[in-house]
Amino acid sequence: VLPSGGDISESPIPLKKKKHEIRQLENVLSQLENENNKTQSSLLQCKETLHEKEILIATITEKLTMMEATMRSQGTTAKEKVKSTLEKIQGIWKNIGVSFKNRDNIRMKIDSCLEDTCQTELENAQALEQKYRDDIQFMLQNIEKMYNALGKQDDFFHVA
């Protein structure tokens, strides 16, 4: 007879059964966690691929707009200048991550007034890039000051 008043012959079977059920549930939980991790990884990969495809679509659409506008304009000199300017703009946008909505708004501007818009957007992109560079330089100077204040100037390493 058990202290709880039950019979010894009754106790081990339900306890073993419960332990077995717990192990089975733990196994199921582990499998579900593994599946979830795989699904999350796959989702992240899909998001990265989608982002790359969106950039590709934006770039192709911009080039198509440039080509259509160039066909309407005169001469190959203008075509080469516009192409060069667009490539510079796209390079800067890629480096700083301009949103697709902004890129599409700019594409519509380019379609209506190609040369002026390209030059203006190049100047805007260059100004934004310089602002980012200035911000980074300012932050690095502050970090370097912190290292110096802590007496750890030898630990501060910066690659320009």
Image (cartoon, rainbow, N blue to C red):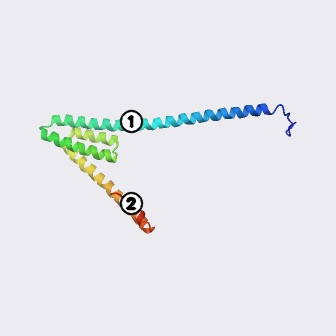
The residue depicted at 50 percent of the width and 35 percent of the height is 38
Q: Is residue 53 visible?
A: yes
Residue type, numbered disc 2: Phe
The residue depicted at 31 percent of the width and 36 percent of the height is 56
Residue 72, located in which quarter of the rendered image?
top left
Residue 66, located in which quarter of the rendered image?
top left
Q: Is residue 76 left or right of residue 100?
A: left
Helix, strand or loop for disc 1: helix
Q: Which residue is mark 1?
A: 50
Q: Is residue 72 above or below residue 93?
A: above
Q: Which residue is mark 2?
A: 157
- The C terminus lies in which quarter of the figure? bottom left
The residue depicted at 26 percent of the width and 38 percent of the height is 62
Marks 2 and 1, how far apart in space?
36 Å
In the foreground, 149 or 8: 8
Sort mark 2 into few (<14), some (14-19) or many (20+) by Cα contacts within 10 Å: few
| Disc number for residue 8 | none
Residue type, numbered disc 1: Leu
The residue depicted at 33 percent of the width and 38 percent of the height is 55
Helix, strand or loop for disc 2: loop
Q: Disc 2 vs disc 1: which is toward the camera?
A: 2
